[in-house]
Image (cartoon, rainbow, N blue to C red):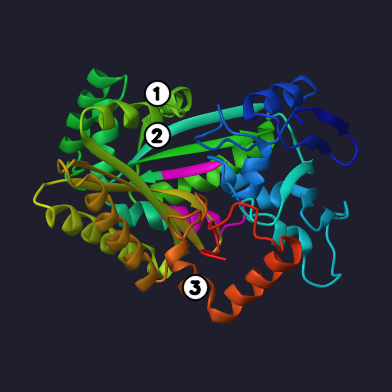
Amino acid sequence: MNRVLDVDRVSLTASVEAGVSGPDLEDELNGSGFTLGHFPQSFEFSILGGWIATRSAGQVSTKYGKIEDMVESLTMVSPAGKLETKSVPASASGPQLKQLLIGSEGTLGVITKAKMRIRRLPEVRRYEGLMFKSFRDGINAIRETMQSGLIPAMMRLSDPDETTVSLMLSSQGVTAKLGLWMLERLGYAPSQECVMILGVEGDHTTVKAERQVAVRACKRNGAFAIGKGVGSTWLSERFELPYLRDVLLDHCILVDTFETATTWDKLKALHAAIKKSIEEAIAGMGVTGLAFAHVSHAYWDGASIYYTLVAPQVKGKEVQQWLRIKKAATDCIMRNGGTLSHHHGIGKDHAPWIKQELGENGLALLKAVKRQLDPEGIMNPGKLLGPN
């Protein structure tokens, strides 16, 4: 179940078995001059069926869309039988079955095949860095760009703490420190400055237009260009962070991530509230830690924000420590207008909050669908919807 079965060069779709890995799928499509454009951080080791089952988002989803935007049709085998959705660009034939199956996290059946919308390989791929005097300025630049209608591949904005950490970890360490010194001379306060990775992809004409709109929005909001080096470094190292996490865990450092999404009017307040909730929960266990974030995926009406936390593990209370932080951060997200998950999914970790996310009737509806397709409750029990 790991083959590309067909590539339709007229409709720009590809029929693909769900077990194909990210690198194998891209290699196959690239050989024909196409790309799916889906690059989650798990890209090297994850598969198409998993992306669809969890409503995955790739790092350039701002331009190419999340996985649910790429699926034209899919096939699922459930205990009650086989389901196949129709391969059409759009339909008004009632609620969309396809969207009900995408994100079902293995609770309804096994996704075996999908027809995916593909793109031509970009002629140009340009990634560069910009520095802002504040997180608010960077958020305003992203919003203005997204609402212009010309959408770049990525506008990834780190908050001040993540900017500091990223530059410390950069393979261009000496150059980064020199750049920070120069920016400080220009009035960019070290405690507030925020780095953005701006990426544009496509044909020459499109890239020129999208970059022009994005750079103008950034400069209107006080951005200072810091060159292509930051962007090319990020592009070459973008799948490496999970390896650092494993090293830190081996040295008794707690590391985890949280992500959500909300509308532009709530984003800045949500960012501050989550940071406070995480750091207070860490301190409540008697240690000092750090929470930092970046705006990862942007839309016309809002964006996703992605948090990383780092703290010393409390010996003998590691699970209790993690649960305390997880609850504090998730409760904060739900209180402040964020979604329970933008792209990591629900699984068991988020299941205690799923009723709050969907509402009582919404949860009952999904449980009824599960009973119809999986009457014995054998498909991924306990995930997504909580206990059967």
Percent position (x, y) of residue 380?
Answer: 60, 51
Distance Cα–Cα, label 2 vs label 3 = 41 Å
In which quadrant will I find the C terminus?
Answer: bottom right
In reply to whether residue 146 is colored magenta, the answer given is yes
The reply to whether discs 2 and 3 touch (Cβ–Cβ < 8 Å) is: no
Q: Is residue 50 above or below residue 21?
A: below
Which numbered dot is residue 355? 3
Looking at the picture, tell me which residue is in the foreground, 379 or 221: 379
Which numbered dot is residue 129? 2
Question: Does residue 120 appear to the left or right of 129 in the view shown?
Answer: right
Q: Earlier in the sequence, mark 1 or mark 2?
A: 2
| Element carrying mark 2 | strand
Q: Amino acid at mark 1?
A: Gly
- Based on the displayed image, in which of its 4 quarters is residue 4 positioned? top right
Q: Earlier in the sequence, mark 3 or mark 1?
A: 1
Question: Does residue 143 appear to the left or right of 300 in the view shown?
Answer: left
The reply to whether discs 1 and 2 touch (Cβ–Cβ < 8 Å) is: yes
| Residue appearing at x 29%, y 40% in the figure | 255
Range of the magenta residues? 141-156
- Can residue 179 be seen here? The reply is no
| Residue appearing at x 67%, y 38% in the figure | 48
Mark 1 packing: few (<14 Cα in 10 Å), some, or many (20+)? some
- Can residue 358 be seen here? The reply is yes
| Residue appearing at x 51%, y 63% in the figure | 386
The label nearer to you, 2 versus 3, is 3
| Element carrying mark 1 | helix
| Element carrying mark 3 | helix
The label nearer to you, 3 versus 1, is 3
Distance Cα–Cα, label 3 vs label 1 = 45 Å
Q: Amino acid at mark 3?
A: Lys
Q: Which residue is mark 1?
A: 229
